[in-house]
Image (cartoon, rainbow, N blue to C red):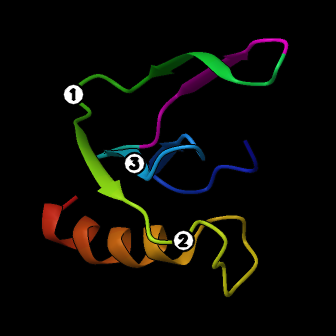
């Protein structure tokens, strides 16, 4: 994981086309990630402020390699989340 400045988190397995994502009404207060010896995430703990809401979604990715601004987030994820987050009203 890199510097986390957003209120969302996307998880994907590069061997499939599925991307799961979480959108948080408030930024988590704690994020703990544990990985196995192959660097595969095997535990993710997210602690949110009291009353925070979470929206869970799933996308099928087209191409995880297209990242026009080189920020490490595939363009299709950024494009989708920029459209959906304002609709949540958070």
Q: How many marks?
A: 3
Q: Which label sits in the foreground, 3 or 1?
A: 3
Distance Cα–Cα, label 2 vs label 3: 11 Å
List the residue tagged with mark 2. 63
The crowd level at tag 1 (other Cα within 10 Å; few <14, some 14-19, many 20+) is few
- Quick check: 47 left or right of 69? left
In the depicted view, which residue is nearer to us: 26 or 8?
A: 8
Which residue is denoted by mark 3 in the rendering?
18
In the image, the segment drawn in magenta is: 27-37
What secondary structure is found at the residue carrying circle 3?
Answer: strand
- Across and down, in percent, residue 79 comes to 41, 79
- Residue 76 position by quadrant: bottom left
Residue at 35% x, 68% y is 81
The residue sitting at the front extreme is 15
Indicate which disc, 3 or 1, sits on the residue closer to the N terminus: 3
Residue sitting at 29 percent across and 22 percent down? 50
């Amino acid at each position: 994981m890199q510097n986390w400045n957003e209120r969302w988190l996307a998880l994907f397995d590069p061997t499939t086309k599925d991307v799961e994502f979480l959108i948080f009404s408030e930024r988590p207060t704690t994020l703990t990630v544990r990985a196995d010896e192959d660097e595969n995430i095997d535990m993710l703990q997210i602690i949110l402020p009291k009353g925070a809401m979470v929206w869970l979604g799933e996308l099928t990715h087209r191409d995880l390699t297209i990242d026009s601004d080189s920020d490490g987030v595939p363009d299709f994820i950024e494009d989708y989340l920029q459209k959906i987050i304002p609709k949540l009203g958070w």
